Amino acid sequence: MVKVVRKKVLNPSVTLLEVEAPMIAKKAQAGQFIILRLDEEGERIPLTIGDYDREKGTITIMFQKVGLTTELLGDLNEGDYIRDFVGPLGQPTRPELGDVKRVCVVGGGVGCAIAYPQAKSLHAEGIQVDVIAGFRSKDIVILEEEFKAACDNFYLTTDDGTYGEKGFVTDKLKALIEAGNQYDAVIAIGPVPMMKFVCKTTEPFGIHTLVSLNPIMIDGTGMCGCCRVTVGGEMKFACVDGPDFDGHKVDFDELMNRNSVYREREAKEKERHTCRMETLAKNMIH
């Protein structure tokens, strides 16, 4: 059981929670994740470690409220507790990069919450880091100041042009590469279609590209097999082999199909919970 010590609403759908987890904070590295469960009846969900403070013994997670568990997680306040909080899980990003001097980190939407620790960690090593952060519009921009402090060059794009440069992250990435910026690697984190097209952008230039995959996951040990992905024609498990993989080898279409399997059931479960809470509220009034 871990205690929430800080809460910050980053935008209407994305929330930051800092929790006391000294054993995890002691070993956590950029790219790794935790699996949490709110209560004994709750589902297990994976969330990337957004930041960690070894001295304070805290772990930071950032998440978008898209399903029942993340909605309930967003309702927690400072002083509340999370029933289960396990990690660090997965492989850290750094060993996958090898010897690099300049890296471009590309984040899309809430994926920027995962991209941030990558940029921060590499920048702290003295590696030159460029960041491209993309959002649909100005009102959902997150971590702008944090990114600026964790990179050498920061570029912000919005689909509708309400903030930063108008266009997609792939437009900016291609422009930077064609302008002569020589990247040893690109790290792309965000919606699966975005990562797919970042990889299509870098492939003609032969730039090593890592992507952080988000398949359905349950136990985090490779036993359940739910998080299997196809990479280079081989089956891999995101929880133990990843979550970072060579993006030029990932079967993104298969990943998108698998991620949509439980969408309808999740919507029904959320509706059932809402009805249950409304009934409880009415009974309390009467």
Image: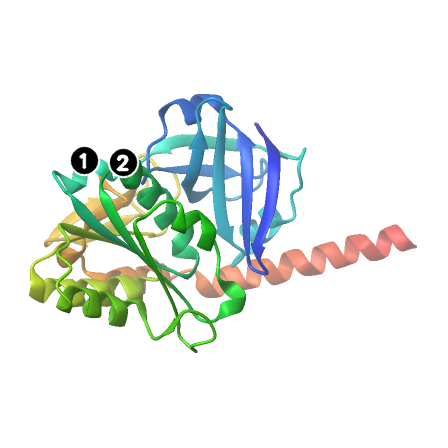
Label 2: few (<14), some or many (≥20) within 10 Å?
A: some
Q: Quadrant of the image for the N terminus?
A: top right
The residue located at (11%, 38%) in the rendering is 99
Of residues 174 and 273, the one drawn nearer to the viewer in this rendering = 174
Q: Amino acid at mark 2?
A: Pro
Residue 123: image quadrant is top left
**Is residue 230 left or right of 70 when viewed as pictured?**
left
In the structure shown, which secondary structural element does the residue marked by tag 2 occupy?
loop
Q: Is residue 184 left or right of residue 2?
A: left
* The residue positioned farthest toward the bottom in the image shown: 160
- Which of the 4 image quarters holds residue 271? bottom right
The amino acid at mark 1 is Pro
What's the mark number on residue 92?
2
Q: Which residue is mark 1?
A: 95
Residue 61 at x, y percent in the picture: 48, 42
Instruction: Estimate the spatial distance between the alpha carbons at disc 1 and disc 2, rounded to whole Å.
Output: 7 Å
What residue is drawn where x is 60% and y is 34%?
Answer: 4
**What's the residue at 29%, 52% (across, down)?**
213
Above or below, comparing residue 49 to residue 279 in the picture: above
Dividing the image into 4 quarters, which one contains the C terminus?
bottom right
**Around disc 1, counting alpha carbons within 10 Å, would you say few (fewer than 14), some (14 to 19), or many (20 or more)?**
few
> Helix or strand or loop: what does disc 1 sit on?
helix
Whole-percent x and y of residue 42?
55, 42
Task: Give coordinates of residue 259: x percent, y percent.
Answer: 35, 59
Are the residues tagged 1 and 2 within 8 Å (C-beta)?
Answer: yes
